[in-house]
Amino acid sequence: MSDDGVDLGRRHFLTVATAITGGVGAVIAVVPFIASMNPSVKAKALGAPVEVDISRLEPGMATYVAWRGRAIAVVRRTPEMLEALPTLDPALDDPDSLEPQQPEYAQNEYRARKSEYLVIESVCTHLGCSPSFRPDVAPEDLGPEWKGGFFCPCHGSRFDLAGRVFKDVPAPLNLRVPPHKYLDENTILVGDDSEVV
């Protein structure tokens, strides 16, 4: 076959133009696909740190916020509540918080940065139910040894006012302490425990 009458310059131009058009089309098709792999604005907001105003939280009371789809309880403990904590150690499964259910700064007898305030995930470590905050002492349904804490109505797991699990209940671990820090005297930031600058 002869190359008579074939414009090689035009053929080269059309080949290059077709390759470039195909490449641009492939990029245009791939960009939305890659962008869809990034978390949505809504998903980013769900994982964002949450500020908790504790200025009006009365001693012995709790307030709740949502962080990452979980209920976070902030409890302002009274001096009597704090005094009762060590008396429960023999009845607890992990009284020294040896299991890694809390950041290092909360691995103490109060499981907290500041003893007065407990910041805890209100999610039972058994099957994920939401334990109720029960600050009452010796209620009829929980018995005379109950000194306040969290009670899971789903399967009866009990946790003290530091979120530590009692022995012989379905929950295997203490309640989790989320990362948190104090922005000032009246504000806790849940979800971020980096140093305040």
Image (tube, grey):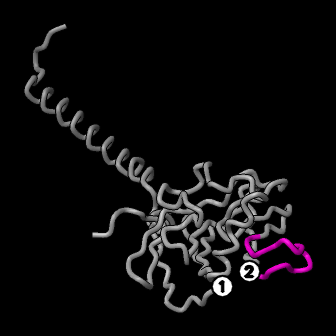
On the image, the x and y values in percent for residue 166 come to 77, 59
Q: Amino acid type of disc 2?
A: Pro
Quarter location, residue 86: bottom right
Q: Label 1: how many residues lie within 10 Å, few (<14), some (14-19) or many (20+)?
A: some
Q: Look at mark 1 in the image and give the residue it sits on.
A: 60
Residue 135: which disc?
2
Residue that sits furthest to the top in the current view: 1
Closer-to-camera residue (32/104): 104
Q: Main secondary structure of the magenta part?
A: loop
Looking at the image, which residue is at 72% across and 60% down?
89
Q: Which residues are magenta?
A: 136-150
Q: In the image, which disc is placed on residue 137?
A: none
Which residue appears farthest toward the left when viewing the image? 9
Q: How many numbered discs sit on the rendered protein?
A: 2
Q: Secondary structure at mark 2?
A: loop
Query: Which residue does the image show at 26% across and 43% down from the upper left?
Result: 24
Tell me residue 197's x, y (percent): 27, 69
What's the distance in space between the residues labelled 1 and 2, CA to CA? 7 Å
Q: In terms of secondary structure, where does tag 1 sit?
A: loop
Residue 177's place in the image compared with 83, above or below, is above
Q: Quadrant of the N terminus?
A: top left
- As drawn, is 153 to the left or to the right of 23? right
First of labels 1, 2 by sequence position: 1
On whether residue 144 falls in the magenta region, the answer is yes
Residue 109 placement: quadrant: bottom right
**Which amino acid does the dot numbered 1 rest on?**
Gly
In this picture, is 12 found above or below 33?
A: above
